[in-house]
Image (cartoon, rainbow, N blue to C red):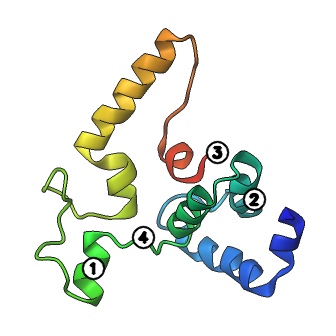
Amino acid sequence: MTVLFLRYPVYQQRIKNITKLSVRTCTSQLDWEKIYLLPFKTTLDTELREFRYIILNRILYTNKMLFKFIRKVDSLLCDFCEKELETIEHLFFHCRKVCAFWDDLKVVLNSLIVTVRLDIKAVLFGI
């Protein structure tokens, strides 16, 4: 099934388009085909697959996007910390409240003798 997924031109084009984003997020050396196939190998839950697709294609509507395109929010700032622009990267990795979550998760996993590397690539792309 995952092989068929990449045969469709629309998905091949999306993989090409996502590499344009890579210059901004220091991800030009990533294996995008592997990243796009990962949800099909790790979960059967279609909602998780859809959420991952939304993140990878940068169509998750953050305050920055909502303000820019349809003016549905009053502020570009993060809803959690209210100090930085709410982007996908900020929302899932750089926000100080989210950083506290990642730090707590590391402590719990370390107590279970599980070593993890939680950098922005691991959080956003699962690699």
Residue 52 falls in which quadrant of the image?
Answer: bottom right
Determine the image quadrant of residue 3.
Answer: bottom right
Q: Residue at x 16, y 50 (%)?
A: 81
Q: Secondary structure at mark 1?
A: helix
Location of mark 2 (residue): 37
Distance between the alpha carbons at the discs numbered 3 and 4: 20 Å
Q: Cα distance, mark 4 to mark 1? A: 10 Å
**Other-residue count near label 1 (Cα within 10 Å), few / some / many at <14 / 14–19 / ≥20:** some
Q: CA distance from mark 1 to mark 2?
A: 29 Å
Residue designated by label 4:
60
The answer to which image quadrant residue 56 occupies is bottom right
Q: Nearer the viewer, mark 3 or mark 4?
A: 4
The x, y position of residue 97, in whole percent, is 24, 41
Q: Residues within 10 Å of mark 3 (few under 14, many from 20)?
A: some
Label drawn at residue 127: 3
Checking the image for residue 66, the label placed there is: 1
Amino acid type shown at disc 4? Leu
Say whether disc 4 or disc 1 marks the residue closer to the N-terminus: 4
Q: Image check: 89 left or right of 3?
A: left
Position of residue 23 in the picture relative to residue 67 (left or right): right
Q: Earlier in the sequence, mark 3 or mark 4?
A: 4
Q: Secondary structure at mark 2?
A: helix
What residue is rendered at 19% in x and 52% in y?
Answer: 80
Residue 44: mark in rendering: none
Residue mark closest to the camera, 1 vs 3: 1
